[in-house]
Image (cartoon, rainbow, N blue to C red):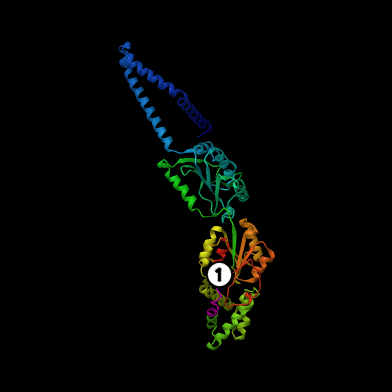
Amino acid sequence: MNKSSSDSKNSSKHFLERVSKIYKEKARKWIIIADIVFLVFLFYFGGVLGSVRDKLIPAAALGVLAILFELLMSISSTLRAESESIVFPSLSEALPKIREIVSHDKQKTSLKIMAATGGTTLATILPSIRESSSARKLEVTIGILDPATPYKEWIPSDWPPEIDRSITRLRSDFTDDDRTSINTFLFRILPATHGLLIDDDHLFLGFYDWTTSGKRYRLSGAELPHHYYQRSKPEHKYYFDLFDSWFQHCPRRPGELKKLFVFDFDGTLVDSYSCLPNVYTSIAYEVGLQEDAVSKFVNAMIEGEDRNDTLRNYHRHTWWPAVFEKFHIYVSEEGLRQLIETYWRLRASQSKVINEVKETLMALRDRGVLAVVCAGDGQYGSKTKRIEESELGVLFDKMVVIGEGAENLTYAVASLMKEYRIDRNEVVVVDDKASSINEISQSMNEVKTVKIEFDGILKSAWAQECTPTYRIGTITEVKKLFDR
């Protein structure tokens, strides 16, 4: 198709659109009025026309049909407008309707909000609602994106600092407002829905989408169209169910992070020491020791384990050969590697979660972030795998292995504080070894330390002195300490 032909079609299309617009906005009303006047005159005063009247009856019939058609179209349009939602270009542009709704509240205005950073909500939406609502109580539950979300590399770079500002603003702007109560939580993943539910009856619903910013795509929420739905309309039920489902079930954590709990693993949460005699007995038989030498071999290996654990030497290939040599055991490097793998497989399978650890961790989850920070096993990835495969792995927000994900315990704790935006005086480090307690006490004296009195088969590393903030006998006492 050539350009002139295309221009001709576009011109015809625009002409028809203008004619249609003129008809709907101006001509239709006067045509209907003229039609009604014609019908009234024809049927009441048509006698004066004589035989001409009969010739006009078909035209009158068409006029009646036209009026009936217009009436049906009008009714259909009205019904459709009532069942369909009202669309606003953005959440901010829905403010007049939002203000109108909350202005009728007398006792309580209830708000459930799903936001991205909370910037638009706190700058525009909430202040406007507070001003427009005359209710005695304003209850707000707002979910915003967790700046430490596992998917943070996919969100716009300016979102985390804006989320920080929103959290600070929520704390400062509403602290002295007795009329308003704010409950904040952080979405661990970005929910599909975005919007505002007022008094459980009025829903302004939008969805996140990718918009272009220059040549790049970025996520947007409040700036995109939002539909208005009413719970009283059965055809809107789906959208209320969708909002409620995401609001209730999207993975989250508390918005007010009161604590960062940092736990060691072996000896603190899991007893992986009591099994050592059985593990080394299996190794003795694996290398072919005679029965009368097995007990001495096991004792020698446990002594070596105790000594090297105190030195924080977790690389068993550096000291096992010396013990093996005393018992005339000689293996190749590959054989030694396989024996160490057998050792960890046996030790992991025979380790036991200490009593009530799982219940304690679950009770602490609602109070902040749970992290496990511990020394490695001497083989890269081995410790992480052990934690993940234990029944406790799913309870932690973060797992850090010293020597793999951090230089030392102090660095690991500092990194967690920065990532989760938690002050030092809100951090708790729980460990069974004095060396870890001393390291934190010397480098971060505001951090609270909890020493668990673990009594296991190894002794040297636990014989050191330390001065923790708290000293407890069992893991369950951690919860009791922070119930105060």
Residue 406 position in % (x across, y down): 64, 64
Which residue appears farthest toward the bottom when viewing the image?
292
**Amino acid type, callout 1:** Thr
Q: Is residue 396 magenta?
A: no
Quarter of the image holding residue 121? top right
**Circle 1 sits in a helix, a strand or a loop, which is it?**
loop
Q: Does 264 sit above or below residue 166?
A: below
Please provide the residue range marked out in magenta. 265-279
- Residue at x-position 33% and y-position 13%: 45
Q: From the viewer's side, name the closer residue of 378 and 482.
A: 482
Q: Is residue 206 visible?
A: no
Quarter of the image holding residue 459? bottom right
Figure quadrant of the C terminus? bottom right
Q: From the viewer's side, name the closer residue of 31 and 238.
A: 238
Q: Does 10 sit above or below residue 235?
A: above
Q: From the viewer's side, name the closer residue of 453 and 251.
A: 453
Q: Does 268 sit above or below residue 134?
A: below
Residue 323 position in % (x across, y down): 61, 82
**Number of marks in the rendered image:** 1
Q: Does 398 sit above or below residue 37?
A: below
Q: Is residue 56 visible?
A: yes
Residue picked out by circle 1 = 474
> What secondary structure do most residues of the magenta stretch adopt?
loop
Asked if residue 416 lies left or right of residue 14, the reply is: right
Q: Is residue 273 magenta?
A: yes
Asked if residue 308 lies left or right of residue 246, the reply is: right
- Residue at x-position 54% and y-position 74%: 347
Residue 8 position in % (x across, y down): 50, 29
Residue 66 position in % (x across, y down): 37, 25
Give neighbour class at mark 1: few <14, some 14-19, many 20+ (Cα, 10 Å). some
